[in-house]
Amino acid sequence: MALLSGRQWVQARPTRRAAAVEAALPARCGPARAARHRAPAPRTAPAAGAARRAATAAAAAVGEAAPPAAALPPLPPLDGSYEAQAAFSSDAAWLVPGRLLLGRYPYTSPDDLAASPGGVTGCHERWEAALDEIVTRGARVFAAVMDEAPPQGKLPIGGRGGYVPYKPVVELIAAAHAPTPPGAVVNGVRHPNLEAFLPPRRRAAAPGVAEYFESERVAFAHWAVAPGAAPDADTLSDIVSDLSSRVRRGQGVYLHSRKGAGRGGAVGAALLVELYGLSADEALERVQRAHDTRNAGGEGFSPETEAQREAVRAFAAARRAGGGKQ
């Protein structure tokens, strides 16, 4: 190949000069250096660029659309069979069988440390077995309505104030229960962080991948509500909006406060109002009777205070006034 003279380099057009450099460099410097000298891509005309950006945004919007709503399970009738269908364990009970559990903080807490003869080790072992059952029965969203402990992502691994984080344990259990990954996942071709950027037809080309990622995905939500308090109207509306959308999409939710009675009971009753259009009185009755299955004596109220029950009634009234929506 003939080398260009200095005058030719100066007079050559940029694309011609870059092409000559690209052709000459690989033999001496390797393809990596040659790539750095390639001519820049031609600029896109403003109209074409705007059209391309609009098309990309439209594709992203389609790709990130929320999953279709799943049918809500029927609620058990309020007859003599209700307790049998609501019962889960001494720590939690079903408000919506198979979809919504209401219970206490699902790992080591100050209440455990005070009552456990085995100390911290005994608490961990008991709760690991309990969490395994909770995850096995479908819970993939863990929602806290309490301010005694920070959100799970900010709680130190060693715990704080007697509360030990359950997030690492839940994630390990969920991964252990996930089905065998599809070949595209095993080969590294598909990853959950890339899914949102793929057009729908590319997602459809690998069946089973989306279902696999959904099966092992766990979410953690947190709303700070003080002990004995009722969420204010705006906070309660935000909580219900978030969790009801998850339940409608078929996600299993474990809702908890410290003991799963007061704050958790108020939010659980409001969720029943939102999801099924129940009256406040029926929703409160369902929460109380579900709570009673957690102990043989049926002691304690859920929600615990009149202010919490009144928050549920106010939520139901606002929903009726708004034509069925908050």
Image: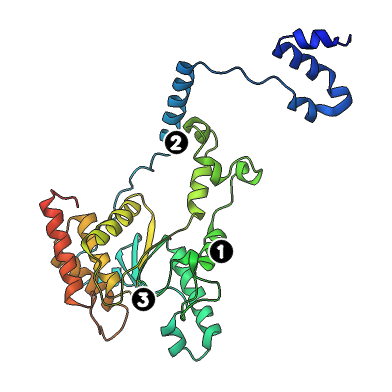
Neighbourhood count class around disc 1 (C-alpha, 10 Å): few under 14, some 14–19, many 20 upward:
few
Q: CA distance from mark 2 to mark 1?
A: 28 Å
Disc number lying in front (3 or 1): 3
Of 319 and 249, the residue lying toward us = 319
Asked whether 114 or 289 is in front, the reply is: 114
What's the residue at 13%, 48% (across, down)?
323
Residue 274, percent from left and from top: 22, 56
- Using the image, tell me which numbered label, if any, was put on residue 172: 1
- In this view, 93 is above or below 196: below
Which residue is label 2 attached to?
Answer: 63
| Residue type pointed to by label 1 | Leu
Residue placed at 55% from the left, 37% from the top?
A: 206
Q: Would you name the residue on which mark 3 appears?
A: 258
**First in residue order: circle 2 vs circle 1:** 2
Q: Is residue 273 visible?
A: yes
Q: Please, what secondary structure does the residue beneath circle 1 have?
A: helix
Question: Residue drawn 80% across and 8% down?
Answer: 8
Sequence-wise, the earlier of marks 3 and 1 is 1
Q: Residue at x 49, y 79 (%)?
A: 126
Q: Splitting the image into 4 quarters, where does residue 28 fall?
A: top right
Give how far across and how far down residue 52 sits, in percent.
48, 22
Circles 3 and 2 in contact, beta carbons < 8 Å: no
- Which of the two discs, 2 and 1, sits closer to the camera? 2
Amino acid type, residue under disc 3 in the picture: Arg
